[in-house]
Amino acid sequence: MQVPFFRPQLGEQEIDEVVATLRSGWLTSGARVKRFEREFAEAVGAPHAVALNSCTAALHLAVEALGLKPGQGVLLPTMTFAATAEVVRYLGAVPILVDCDPISLNMNLDDAARKLSADYADYTETGSRKQKAEGRRQKAEGRKQRAEGRGQKAEGGGRTADGGGKEAGAAEVVGIMPVHVGGMMMDVAAVKEFATKHSLWVVEDAAHAFPAAWKNCELRIADCGLAAQGAKGDGQGAKGDEQGAKVEGERAKGMGGQQRQGIGARKSAISNQQSAISNPVWQRCGEGTADVSCFSFYANKTITTGEGGMAATGDADLAARMRLMSLHGLSQDAWERYSGGSSWDYRIVAPGFKYNLTDIAAAIGIHQLARAEEMRQEREGVARSYLEALADCEQIELPPKGASVIHAWHLFAIKLRLERLTISRDQFIEELKKAGVGCSVHWRPLHLHPYYQETFGWRPEDFPVATKVWERLISLPIFPGMISEEIEYVAEMMRGICEAHRR
């Protein structure tokens, strides 16, 4: 039997909608993109959603809209895909890598605090590893004094050691980018608390986390607000459709140049959110969980448009800036110019990018979105079957289910107990491939890639958990439509390889 790592589940509705789009005469961003944005905003409980051609584009536009500048620092996990860090480098800023939790693989906030300490100040600057080694030796004598000095300034809001900052010459840390690995959300309240303490904005890499939620014990339903108001808002958000787009367009006209700097300078929107101890509520990923939440619709994601992404936010100004910059920085897009509702003319407000989603892609997304929870439940069923079938396999550590989360189950990542096996992870994968089972690894941590080693001098010992755990990781097939025979076959092959190579 051959079991692929992933198989997209596309139905006749997606096919019919694509055909209708092709016959409509309008293929690029238009009415279907507007509909997709509106319905996605409703699905996650966000007032605004901007459809884009990738999650990478969403992340890039998010940090750009927040005013990230060259030389500034952003905390992000080493256990992530290339996109999370590369968008920071696009703007000449510094990705400050953070170790992971050994169980969930999500960002470890305790290590994030350590990375803001004096001991890591020289890692937030670019330069050769040799230069950094010399710098570390020269700085060793003064670190204690610097830490003491920063501790005294902590209350001054300058992102100091106790408040999360650096000395002159190192990066000013302005943001944090958590990733919900595999679709299991990390503690959003803890991220919020950390961001508030260190005066950081939050951009959420939610590429794996739709649909997903977590039980927020600090928010009352009324305070969550976005669920009740969100996409049902006042017409300025995604539900406003063409009218809302025009409102955002008017905002965008005033957001060129230095005016947008005020967006990044303000305190984090989620940091200002009022909270109270009350009945716990389920808070969806994207429902006020970050300043901007970025989702992926790549071919193997929980819903797909082939290639695509979405940026969701509660901030109208951020939404307007991202929409503006997604299409060359033009004051109005082609749909507005040619649909009969606006002038043919436009103005270039800022040097933007070409990140818009097409109506062809949105035609797929509209119907994928309608079945998103149904498909999530199918993936959850696959995960449950794996957990039962492999529960007594002592060579495997199974992924956590998460008691206070609704898991998207984009990935089912097991960890090998290599001390109980006579083969390595890579050899184990080769055995699975020979048996016809597709699999992958998520991920080789960023600090083990040449670019981040050579540019920033990160060492394996700076990330002891990720350095060790990634050598044990294997992602097994999990997708909606996976039949019981396929699930049973994968589990049987896993058990067989473990038995054949047990120590």
Image (cartoon, rainbow, N blue to C red):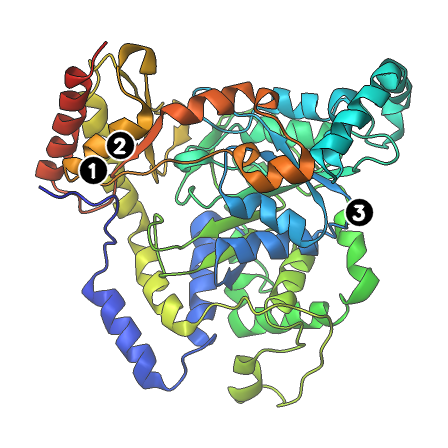
Q: Is residue 398 visible?
A: yes
Q: Are marks 2 and 1 in contact (CB under 8 Å)?
A: yes
Compared to residue 140, the image places residue 483 above or below, namely: below
Give left or right: position of 453 versus 32. right
Which amino acid, mark 2? Ile
Q: Quadrant of residue 268?
A: top right
**Residue underneath mark 1:** 433
Give percent across and percent down for residue 310. 49, 56
Between the C-alphas of marks 2 and 3, the distance is: 47 Å
Compared to residue 494, the image places residue 7 above or below, namely: below
Between the C-alphas of marks 2 and 1, the distance is: 6 Å
**Does dot 3 land on a helix, a strand or a loop?**
helix
Q: Residue lying at the far front in this picture: please name it.
A: 130
Give left or right: position of 268 versus 167. left
Which amino acid, mark 1? Lys
**Residue underneath mark 2:** 429
Quarter of the picture containing the C terminus is: top left
Q: Is residue 225 visible?
A: no
